[in-house]
Image (spheres, helix red, strand yellow):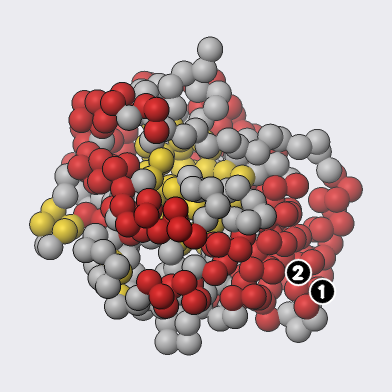
Amino acid sequence: MNKIIGPLIINIDGYKLTAEETELIDNPLVGGVILFENNYENHQQVTDLISSIKDIKDDLIISIDHEGGRVQRFKKNFTNLPSFEFISSIRDSVERERLAFCSGFIAGYELNQIGVNLNYSPVIDISHPSSKLLKDRTFGTNPNTVIKLSLAYIKGIIKAGVTPVLKHYPGHGSVDTDTHTQLCITETSYQSLLEKDLIPFVEILKHFSIPIMTNHVLYQNIDKKICSFSQKLLRSIPGEIFKFKPIFISDDLEMYSAKYINNNFIKCDDRVLLALKAGCQYVICTSKLVENINEYKSSSHYFIENYISNSILDYRRQNHVNIRKLNLISKDDEKVDLYNENLDLIERYKDG
């Protein structure tokens, strides 16, 4: 019998699970793990680590940020994938889409081999000329190009057996500031989002039912709360623009922009409740941005003290009928020949 899968996606500290981390992952509020560079020593080690995590709950989300370019958590003994900006720079449109498919397939295949089942990629934000924050991480400024290349990438990663996540809803491309370090406010209107930033989300969800990551930007002409805490952006608007309501996963709730409302600090468990009540099904909460993490024995100790609360558990119990489980893509048959064929194309562009 499968154990209860909760909304929290957390990180762990090292190459092996500690007893405290094992107990934490077994908690009914934990639904997934997000991996970082500090969790990888070699392929066998990380495969064993993921296997030990799944031994606790076999249907846990095992996730990672593995886009390519400057955001690729595992690089040693993995293919160094091209950035989305590089892919979009290829002049031949057929070759562009082929490279996008290859990048998705290679990412998925290599992650699948070690047991990762969800990748926070692709970035489908529309890059705006005035913003350089996400420039190299996007497929460009043209919505149609972003849609075509994103669809090719998604087909590749799904074929390899890994679930992709679209980000950063409802569009981060026009925002210059960084939600990791400051409150990000934009005057972008709902109509403007509809005419540009939301187009890739709407079009891609016509083809695939895949999860979406929410950003922590405050769209002050739409709501007075950041997107991850906004019922308007996560309930009302999706009901208008999507045929089926997607599963939303919040970006890291330890980012600065998620920690304060009107300069008032929000407790960790309150952030989780704000996100769940707004419409997120899962929330990422890592220790990577916690300034005083050294005051705790471990990341798991921090999570136990700040995120494992009766208020979240009570909310989950009271709203169990509204909880939607993420259906992860099944592991496909190994496709070594297809892997080698796609790897050749990636290597050719790297060498060229």
- Which residue: 44% across, 27% down? 5
Label 2, label 1: how far apart the Cα atoms are: 5 Å
What kind of residue is marked 1?
A: Val
Residue 229 at x, y percent in the picture? 28, 53
In the picture as drawn, the residue positioned furthest to the bottom comes out as: 129
In the picture as drawn, the residue positioned furthest to the top comes out as: 1
Total residue callouts: 2
Q: Is residue 240 left or right of residue 96?
A: left
To which quarter of the image does residue 175 belong? bottom left
- Which residue: 25% across, 46% down? 274
Q: Is residue 1 left or right of residue 270?
A: right
Q: Quadrant of the C terminus?
A: bottom right
- Which residue: 68% across, 73% down? 87
Q: Is residue 99 left or right of residue 147?
A: right
Q: Give the labeled residue for mark 1.
A: 94
Q: Nearer the viewer, residue 245 or 166?
A: 245
Q: Is residue 94 above or below residue 260?
A: below
Residue 75 at x, y percent in the picture? 60, 55
Residue 77 at x, y percent in the picture? 67, 51
For residue 15, the mark is none
Q: Nearer the viewer, residue 276 or 64?
A: 276
For residue 97, the mark is 2
Q: Marks 1 and 2: in contact by CB < 8 Å? A: yes
- Which residue: 69% across, 69% down? 148
Q: Is residue 265 above or below residue 200?
A: above
Q: Is residue 119 visible?
A: no
